[in-house]
Amino acid sequence: MHEENTGPDHGQGRLRRTLSVRGVESGALVEAWRNPEVQRQVMAEFADWLGGDAGSMRWRLHLPMDRELEVESREVGHEPGRRVRHATRSTNAHPASMECEFFVQPAPAGRGTEAVLAVEYAMPGGVAADMALKLFGAVPDVLAGRVLRRFKALMEAGEIPTLARNPSARDRD
Amino acid sequence: MRALCWNGVNDLRVETVPDPVLVNPRDVILKVNLTTTCGSDLHFIDGYLPTMREGDVIGHEFMGEVVEIGAEVRRLRPGTRVVVPSFISCGRCWHCDHQEFSLCDNTNPHAEIQEPMLGYPTAGIYGYTHAFGGYAGSHAQYVRVPHADVGCLEVPDGVSDMDALFLSDAAPTGFMGADYCDIQGGDIVAVWGCGGVGLMAMAGAFLLGAERVIAIDRFPERLALARGLGAETLDYTEVDVVDALRELTGGRGPDACIDAVGMEAHGTGAQYAVDRAKQALHLHTDRGEALRQAIRACRKGGVLSILGVYGLMDKFPIGVVMNKGLTVRASQVHGPRYLPRLMAYAQAGRLSTSFLATHVMPLEEAVRGYEMFKKKEDGCVRAVFRPG
């Protein structure tokens, strides 16, 4: 994963994450990424689906320290079978923003398709924003790493690994 | 249900926990008939491996009977008696397609814990640390088995529960270690450790055509079990192992050396004392005495096959490996690669495993079972639990 701070302001950056996916034709991966039901499953650990369609999806993001942020993710570019781009903004005037591009490229023989997620994010607002980004800071990793891994599992294996309802003695209290 | 839970370093308790349920469509729920201790459990019980959470249900070597199946399970039905590999694999990713099942891309829910250290995450495993997924383990009355069509192998009539149990982990791990040695006619294989995995490595080496097998341990009863398989034995507290192996192999050294000991090796001498001190001070996680000995003992151009579990070790003599031209092979067990073959051996009477079950007891006595297993009391090789 490549991550960098792009400007003098705190709270901005971009990163890119790639995983290889087998068993699904590359164009179908792009269309699956646009599918709200797929997005709902992939994002389930991190956000509640509030509604929408492929053109515009609304989410409630789970942030550290029990904070939440409602956002709208709009599709702002789509080359069928090749790439799709989403712009995400807060629905309640919070200055955080993010743009994500998902695109595919061929992998060497037998490796399937390389699925790439490129993320640019910004949270302007000085030191306070910088601190917020540290709280919020898991999000770029979450989106570029965990989300892409969950997407790969769903596409390749048909399900996402989960510890939901995993028995333990932690419930004894 | 009742289950054996980890509650802190050397703090195990049998407790009541919620029953597992079907979560994903390829899951089954298994009623556990038999489940056994494994030496790799001791690493987190003793506190050497991090990312356990209080209340975790442990155990990863087991067999039982299918009682519920998910909507997309095709090969199994309620009532099917199965043995289950310790690692969970999806059967569809590149690694599964290449028979590297413990490297599956799609079954570790906590891949992000492993990635910073390993670069790329492994598969998930039952009843182990959260770095390896955090799935509830098999020391329980019931367990959820994800991707059950890939993992579960039906136990045929004529193979008892006890004969099937060790095909879950000890037998395929040991056999894999022997397979990695690329054994040729006339080869001599040395195996460090006469626990369940080491003994199965010896059995595997003979099945794959080794001329001779030399077993290294310090416990007389375990060395006797190795001799029962046809191995020659060395007690490392009585001889210099490297010298002894040189003499036993015509001055050449063993063609292949299998480490079935791992990070809590015992030993003699100054390096062992340094290892213990550094481990106690958390300066590294591993006592690598057996591994270093195997590297020195192996013949030039030979194979080092590592089955023992390790964390982070310094003082690893890579220069010796390089200058002697050793081939190093290692992995966690790729269970489904070997299970059908081992089941066929068991059916044909060519592989016996139930002798590993030296102590069988109800799950309610599992804390005592682990204590016996850890301290090797009463000749304990494996404690086996019947959840009932």
Image (cartoon, rainbow, N blue to C red):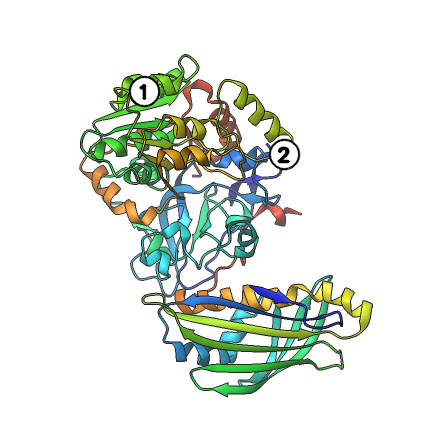
Position in image of residue A97 (x %, y %): 68, 78
Nearest the camera: B51 or A6? A6
Label 2 or label 1, whichever lies nearer to me, is 1
Type of amino acid under label 2:
His
The residue depicted at 51 percent of the width and 57 percent of the height is B109
Residue assigned mark 2: B282
Nearest the camera: B349 or B246? B246
Q: Is residue A81 above or below residue A40?
A: below
- How many numbered marks have been drawn onto this rendered protein structure? 2
Type of amino acid under label 1:
Arg
* Labels 2 and 1: the sequence-earlier one: 1
Q: Please, what secondary structure does the residue beneath circle 1 have? A: helix
Position in image of residue A168 (x %, y %): 57, 48
Disc 2: which chain? Answer: B
Q: Which label was assigned to residue B246?
A: 1
Query: Mark 2 to mark 1: distance in Å?
Result: 35 Å
Q: Is residue B300 left or right of residue B382?
A: left
Disc 1: which chain? Answer: B
Position in image of residue B263 (x %, y %): 50, 33
